[in-house]
Image (tube, rainbow, N blue to C red):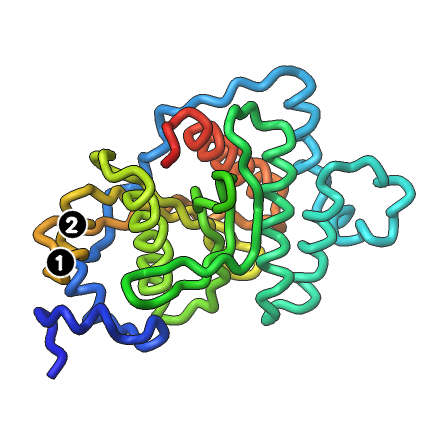
Amino acid sequence: MTTLQSPSILLQPIDKWTPEHLDFLQVDDGQPFMFLSNITVETDQADDEFLGYFLIPTQDVLNFLHHRSRNRTNPFRLTFSYLHRVLDVADDPRPQMGLIESLLEVLLSFSPRRTRLVTKRAESLKFGSLRIKCDGLFKQDQWTLVPVATFLVLKGSGDNKIRETQQILAQAILAFAQQPEMDEFIGFVVCSTGTALYLAGAHITRGYIESLRKYQRPSLRFQVCRSATYDLKIPDGRKDVAMLLLRMLKYLDERKLP
């Protein structure tokens, strides 16, 4: 019989996880999102002008597809195109995933970085004897893609925390497999519900992962922190989420990735 303390709880299919799995993993809500508070992004005049595209009036964004000739050089044209589609088909997760992906691709294009980061969809990551589907931002490492942030499209249901936890755990397990000498790893998940975006993250220690490898209940807490939620329909929301994601990209650039 599977109980809260039973190791077999981790062997259940990913789509069968319940709040009991979060209890076993010691998951709780962390403190206010402070991971990136000490990361500064210095922008020059060109960058400020570039980010100014986010402040285009919302009505112009929604009419973007009707003004392609005028906006041919707009670097956010794909982002606006997906934003338009999300508003038209709010219950379709594909435009939402495309919206996140196109937003990160634009920011990557002018974020100073030494590491090659690529966006990719449907990378299947091994988690114990299971596999978790991960869409997201990856580091190219020879023939493999190591996740540095994953993307989630949420439906506002009660399983949001479960899905966030699975994505962060999958990243951490792979990261420690690549670089076992690390003391800790921070996993990020860019979450979307329609046009609302937020960033979730958690510190995972080596000791925590070692407990899971032994199928033991960890003694350490798994604290998931979440940023404010930003609405991409609002110009200031677009600008604020861009700066948050730029700080994330700068952090990923500066840390020694596995």
Q: Quadrant of residue 22?
A: bottom left
Image point (55%, 50%), residue name:
231
Answer few, some or many: residues within 10 Å of disc 2's Cα (few below 14, many 20 plus, some between 14 and 19): some
How far is the residue under mark 1 from the one under mark 2? 6 Å
Amino acid at circle 2: Glu
Q: From the viewer's perspective, tell me whether residue 116 is left or right of residue 128.
A: right
Q: Look at the picture and state if 20 lies above or below 109.
A: below
| Residue 230: mark | none
Q: Residue 244: x and y, percent?
A: 48, 36
Q: Which residue is mark 1?
A: 214
Q: Residue at the right extreme?
A: 69
Q: Residue 184, image x and y in percent?
A: 24, 37
Q: Which residue reaches farthest front?
A: 143
Q: Residue at x 33, y 67 (%)?
A: 130
Decide which of 178, 133 is in the foreground and name it: 178
Where, quadrant-wise, is the C terminus in this rendering?
Answer: top left
Q: Say which amino acid is labelled 1.
A: Lys
Q: Quadrant of residue 111?
A: top right
* 1 to 184, vertically: above or below: below
Looking at the image, the residue that sits furthest to the bottom is: 1
Secondary structure beneath label 1: loop
Residue visible at 57% across and 42% down? Answer: 118
Residue sticking out furthest to the top: 44
Q: Which residue is mark 2?
A: 210
Above or below 19: residue 96: above
Q: Position of residue 250 (x, y in %)?
A: 47, 28
Residues at marks 1 and 2 touching, judged by CB atoms closer than 8 Å:
yes
User: What residue sits 37% from the left and 63% below the top?
Assistant: 163
